[in-house]
Image: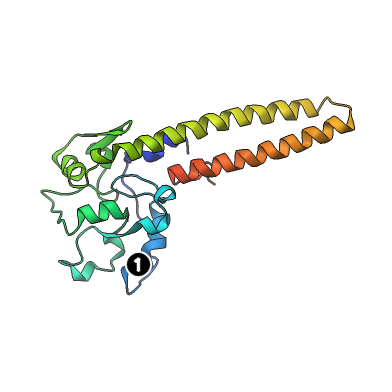
Amino acid sequence: MSDPFDALLFPRKRHLRGPDPGPFSYPQAYKAHLRREFLSKCVYCRVPDGLKGYEGFGVDHYLPASRFTALAVAWSNLFYACNVCNTWKSDCLSTPERFLPNPCEHRMADHLQYRGAEVETFTAHGEWLADLLHLDERRRLREFILSALGRFLRARIELLGDLVALEDRIEIVRSAEERSFLEIAIQETGQELERVDRQIELLTGEPLFSG
């Protein structure tokens, strides 16, 4: 990812959904596939499941299954959402005239966007989503995520600098004892860097490096 903070924003482009991994006979069978499809984040509040845990997320029916039984296991109607958003959304019905933005049918950033920990709405649809899901009331959680992400990113920069300095130093040392010490320091610094990278990925829901 280019900027880890961007991973927590509402997307500027529509998401092109992948092929149906089913068909399955019950919605929960899609959960793991939806998690991969939407990069481990709630499509409505952008909170990653690395923070709340996999059990804190579920399968959302964009058009409620209670009213649209034929869509209960339709891949195109299912989204990955945290249990908080799923509960607040409940059986809310979207129509072409009044809809809750979703990443497959809409450019969500056209309707609402985060400015730091606060949400700004640009359309009546974005305002409806923010109000219905109480996004502003969850500001402290987002502040925590942004603060933690900033700390880990700063730690990553420091560790990379330490690693470069250690690798440069080991090229010029002559003492076997000092070389052994530096090799251990390089290994430990690399391990700490891997731990920091894992924390960044948990906070963003996305790998630092792809491909």
Q: Residue at x 27, y 38 (%)?
A: 109
State left or right for residue 32 relative to residue 179: left
- SS state under label 1: helix
Q: Residue at x 50, y 40 (%)?
A: 200
Quarter where residue 170 is shown: top right
Q: Is residue 12 above or below residue 81?
A: above
Give coordinates of residue 25: x percent, y percent. 32, 75
Q: Outermost residue toward the bottom?
A: 25
The residue tagged 1 is 28
Q: Outermost residue toward the right?
A: 175
Q: Residue at x 65, y 42 (%)?
A: 191
State left or right for residue 190 relative to residue 152: right
State left or right for residue 57 relative to residue 99: right
Q: Residue at x 25, y 68 (%)?
A: 72
Number of labels in the image equals: 1
Q: Type of residue at label 1? A: Gln
The residue lying toward the viewer, choosing from 38 and 56, is: 56
Q: Is residue 205 visible?
A: yes
State left or right for residue 8 relative to residue 194: left
Give coordinates of residue 182: x percent, y percent. 78, 32
Give coordinates of residue 82: x percent, y percent. 32, 53
Q: How many residues crowd mark 1 within 10 Å: few (<14), some (14–19), many (20+)?
A: some
Q: Is residue 3 visible?
A: no
The residue lying toward the viewer, choosing from 181 and 46, is: 181
Give coordinates of residue 98: x percent, y percent. 12, 48
